[in-house]
Image: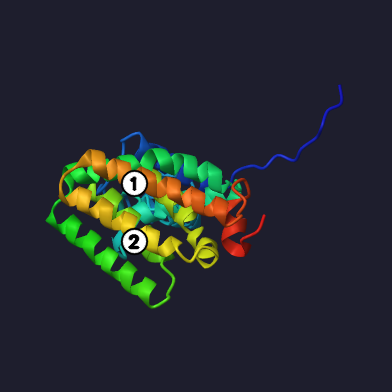
């Protein structure tokens, strides 16, 4: 047997403090809105100096687990959805996930998202979808990029379904997947028009409270996206980041 030596890293005290508070937040010992003691009291309780507490708090703030409503007040908070999404998006990029991996998940999640929207969307959600669609069509007519607005449309559909678990699960997938339109649109001039038609049909089904049609049209829309990639000769198994940046494997 040949032993492979490896240097061990000892966690800094501020990381241990941060991990302990995070554990108490996640197990419910500390609840959102609970006020934490001041830095001096925390330092005495944990047997460390104030600079250690200060660094640990900064780490927790970066994760969205605590916030300061005032300079002298520190409370437990819920991470914002966009902070969690950003973290998940970075992880997916680091894993070099492919278009096909993202697409398979979207094919399952996005039709469900449309179905729930048709069941639960209220007037405000419908107005938001109409506004997004109008801006998408104006951008298309002006020859402008539709990627950000298209991504927003799918986010709005998910929001209309009033399911926070689904919103959180699909947002990083959608953000990376629909960025593929940046390289797809120039290669397939008709892609933008097909996108507009699909979006109109999905909104109409949601407004009519027709979950089956909403699901069917969203599934067609996602399947059409994959066909577009294939027709454009884009690599389905290459990292999505590479496709988005260069359009090549």
Please say if 78 is above or below 7: below
Q: Pick whichever, 31 or 56, lies toward us.
A: 31
Residue drawn 41% across and 64% down? 192
Q: Pick whichever, 161 or 210, lies toward us.
A: 210
Asked if residue 165 shows in the view, the reply is: no
The residue furthest top is 1
Mark 2 closeness class: few <14, some 14–19, many ≥20 residues within 10 Å: some
Q: Secondary structure at mark 2?
A: helix
Q: How many marks?
A: 2
Asked if residue 195 shows in the view, the reply is: yes
Residue drawn 23% across and 46% down? 117
Mark 1 closeness class: few <14, some 14–19, many ≥20 residues within 10 Å: many
Residue drawn 41% across and 47% down? 222
Residue 93 - label: none
Q: Secondary structure at mark 1?
A: helix
Residue 73 percent across, percent down from the top left: 29, 59
The residue furthest left is 123
Is the residue under label 1 in contact with that under label 2 (CB below 8 Å)? no
Please say if 178 is above or below 48: below
| 212 with respect to 107 (left or right) | left
Residue 144 percent across, percent down from the top left: 42, 75
Q: Quadrant of the N terminus?
A: top right
Q: Quadrant of the C terminus?
A: bottom right
Residue 218 - label: 1
Residue 34 percent across, percent down from the top left: 26, 47
Q: Pick whichever, 100 or 166, lies toward us.
A: 100
User: Cα distance, mark 2 to mark 1?
Assistant: 12 Å
Residue 196 - label: 2
The residue furthest right is 2
Residue drawn 24% across and 38% down? 212
Residue 217 percent across, percent down from the top left: 31, 46
């Amino acid at each position: 047997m040949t032993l492979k030596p490896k240097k061990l890293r000892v966690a800094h005290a501020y990381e241990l403090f941060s991990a302990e508070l995070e554990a108490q937040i996640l197990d419910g010992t500390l609840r959102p809105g609970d006020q934490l003691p001041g830095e001096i009291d925390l330092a005495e309780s944990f047997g460390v100096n104030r600079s250690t507490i200060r660094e640990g708090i900064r780490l927790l703030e970066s994760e969205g687990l605590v916030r300061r409503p005032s300079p002298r007040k520190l409370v437990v908070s819920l991470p914002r959805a966009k902070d969690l999404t950003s973290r998940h998006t970075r992880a997916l990029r680091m894993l070099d996930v492919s278009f096909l991996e993202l697409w398979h998940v979207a094919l399952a999640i996005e039709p469900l998202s449309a179905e729930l929207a048709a069941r639960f969307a209220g007037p405000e959600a419908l107005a938001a979808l109409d506004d997004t669609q109008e801006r998408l069509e104006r951008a298309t007519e002006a020859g402008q990029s539709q990627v950000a607005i298209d991504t927003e449309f799918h986010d709005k559909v998910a929001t209309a379904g009033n399911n926070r678990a689904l919103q959180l699960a699909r947002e990083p997938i959608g953000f990376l997947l629909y960025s593929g339109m940046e390289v797809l649109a120039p290669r397939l001039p008709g892609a933008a028009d097909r996108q507009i038609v699909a979006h109109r049909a999905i909104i109409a089904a949601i407004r009519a409270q027709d979950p089956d049609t909403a699901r069917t049209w969203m599934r067609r829309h996602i399947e059409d996206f994959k066909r577009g990639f294939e027709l454009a000769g884009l690599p389905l198994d290459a990292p999505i980041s590479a496709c988005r940046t260069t359009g090549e494997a």
